Image: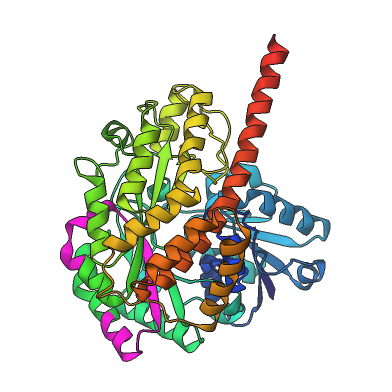
Amino acid sequence: MKILLINPEVPNTFWSLKHALNFVSKKALLPPLGLLTVAAMLPESFEKKLIDMNVTRLRDRHLKWADMVFLTGMVIQKKSVDHIIERCKKLNVKIAAGGPLFTAFPEAYLTIDHLVLKEAEITLPTFLKDLQKGCPEPYYTTRERPDLKETPIPQWDLINMKKYGLMGIQYSRGCPFNCDFCDVTRLFGHVLRTKTKEQIIAELDSLYAAGWRGELFFVDDNFIGEKNVLKKELLPAMIQWMEQKNNPFCFNTQASMNLADDDELMTLMVRAGFDCVFIGVESPDETSLTECHKTQNTGRDLVAAIKKIQQFGLQVQAGFIVGFDGDKPGVFDRMINLIQDSGVVTAMVGLLNAPRGTNLYKKLMSENRLTEPPTGDNMDCTMNFIPRMDIHELLGGYQKVLNTIYSQKYYCKRIKTFLENYNFADAIMPKVRYSSIKAFFRATWRIGVIEKGKFHYWKLILWSLKKPRRLPLVVRFSIYGFHFRKMLKSIRFQMNELAAASANAGNSVG
């Protein structure tokens, strides 16, 4: 049987880093790890091809080749998903679909031939068994959560690694916390399930054997959810492996703010090769953190916690949210100050949305404040509920935050703040490669010559030369900043459209 696995296109967003990837001649940030894992679960007798529409165009000949399309999707990929489904129907190609989008909105995709929902380790084998018997059902789901010890190594040979900026790996699923706007626990539960250290080492071996060198992203929603196992088993094994292989990778992941409370864990992570963590900071206001049950962030000095993590040798990327019921107009200036003072260079500031099934969604439904499904991109200026703050004041404050923190002046100042606090001593820095040198010259021309605000770029470059180890990070952050400013132009355009629509609606009412 011929199976075509398709990863839909992801629109250009804050995290796509598409404008930055152009500097290193990459097409996409990450490969579709879920599909590669699913591919490894298929029978050996199946012929398999994978099309990632973020790096390769999907053509009719690909669809005509297939006996069945395996389609995944997140909410943010919905537009591309719908287009793929339309094309498959025209060519009479059957579809089996799974992933977060279909699990969250199964009723919107009842015309698909087969929905294989929840986690594939449980539902996919049942579907495959029925498929081989010639009697597959239209709908497969479960309430069980699989043991990840049976999850296979992703089938890396289905992709061209040179097209991607990072490779992905997964250690755990689930999160022990209960943030009311987050759908991670609805998808994967509160009890953390992990792979064994042997599995992770085997996956590292597979990536190494496939020729990958460079950055590797642990896609876990909260990598440190099971601290004791990390400290006693996985991280020591990774340290040993990295030393034996001469540090071929550097790692980044997502974690919770309580990482700052565990010196031993931070030390081991840095020794193992981690140099960056993404943390959901959300808000500078204790009231808003309490409102959304972000208990791991309450009762602490957020700036001090972030700086401590940086001092251990971990860059902190962070997410921030405006639009909580408890937000007051002063929240915007306090958020700017928090971001600038902490030296969080990569700060994703978005508008609050309520994914289906979350506690926030249920609360807003009971208050009759829901409007439309979220887009999955919390920086596209849309909200799926009616906020307490006046929408014009909220959008104006949101735009002020973005315009400030991603202006060249404030952005370069923040890079300097971070690098003055960051501990280079134990960090395993990415090796300088040809692509890095090429990126430097492209950045010098595009940011240092063509772009407005070049004075701040050159001032930062000259400052970094006093301690040359800072230079690669300065160049990298400057390239990221270029992408963020490009995205900011898109956000301004969307805000102007919203303002115009609002004005026209007001005139119509008048």
Q: Nearer the viewer, residue 67 or 182?
A: 182
Kindly identify the residue that appears in the image at 62 percent across and 73 percent down. Answer: 25
Nearest the viewer among 408 and 265 is: 408
Q: Is residue 155 visible?
A: no
Q: Residue at x 35, y 56 (%)?
A: 174
User: Does the segment drawn in magenta span residue 158?
Assistant: no
Classify residue 63 by image quadrant.
Answer: bottom right
Q: How is the image coloured?
A: rainbow
Identified at 76% across, 71% down, the residue is 62
Report if residue 262 lies within the magenta region. yes
Is 396 located above or below residue 110 in the figure? above
> Residue 115: x and y, percent?
60, 54
Residue 208 horizontal side relative to residue 445, left or right:
left
Residue 10 in view (yes/no): yes
Magenta segment boundaries in residue numbering: 239-265
- Pinpoint residue 194: horizontal percent, then vertical percent: 32, 66
- Quadrant showing the C terminus: top right
Measured as percent of width and height from the top left, residue 138 is found at 63, 54
Residue 33 to residue 202: above or below: above
User: Would you say 140 lies left or right of 459 here?
Assistant: right
Compare residues 241 and 403 and report the one nearer the observer: 403
